[in-house]
Amino acid sequence: MTRPAAVVFDLDGVLADTEPVFCAGLREMLAPAPLSDEQYASIIGMSSEATWRWVKEAFRRPESVEELRALCRPFTDRALDEAILRPLDGAVALLPNSKRRA
């Protein structure tokens, strides 16, 4: 097997499924307004900017996109602290074959 010259991680959902964490944090931030599974599914894969614009419009929030992102951070941090994350298929096998470079 040929070893790749480089591996780049975007740090979100690459090594573990973090969608449930973000969903939980977003739901908690938006409460008592409900965020349905269908609504959440519609934003999966969107850029961060597009996601927060959608939240702002869909929930008629007066905050800026940056303010919404900052408001949600403590909720997603707490959800992450409480989550039991499991590595995605192939993640464990990939890491020992990767070398960190500055």
Image (cartoon, helix red, strand yellow):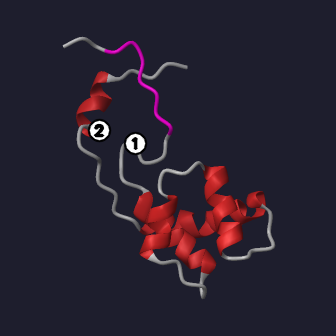
* Label ID, residue 14: 1
Q: For the residue labelled by badge 1, is the local secondary structure a helix, a strand or a loop?
A: loop
Q: Locate residue 56, reporting x and y percent.
A: 71, 68
Instruction: Give the mark nearer the N terminus: 1 vs 2.
Output: 1
* Label ID, residue 91: 2
Q: Locate residue 54, reporting x and y percent.
A: 64, 63
- Looking at the rendered structure, the kind of residue marked 2 is Ala
Image-quadrant location for residue 102: top right
Rendered residue at 72%/65% (across/down):
68
Span highlighted in magenta in the image: 4-10
Judge whether residue 26 is colored magenta: no
In the image, is residue 90 above or below residue 55? above
Rendered residue at 60%/84% (across/down):
31
Whether residue 69 is visible to the viewer of this picture, yes or no, is yes
Asked if labels 2 and 1 touch by Cβ distance under 8 angstroms, the answer is: yes
Q: Quadrant of the N terminus?
A: top left
Measure the alpha-carbon separation of dots 1 and 2: 8 Å
Rendered residue at 48%/50% (across/down):
45
Q: Locate residue 58, reporting x and y percent.
A: 65, 72
Around disc 2, counting alpha carbons within 10 Å, would you say few (fewer than 14), some (14 to 19), or many (20 or more)?
A: few
Which residue is nearer to you in this view: 82 or 71? 71
Residue 36 placement, left or right of 92:
right
Count of marks, rendered view: 2
Residue 78 placement, left or right of 99:
right
Which residue is nearer to you in this view: 56 or 15? 56
Residue 52 placement, left or right of 18:
right
Find the residue positioned furthest to the left.
1
Whether residue 81 is visible to the viewer of this picture, yes or no, is no
* Label ID, residue 41: none
- Looking at the rendered structure, the kind of residue marked 1 is Val
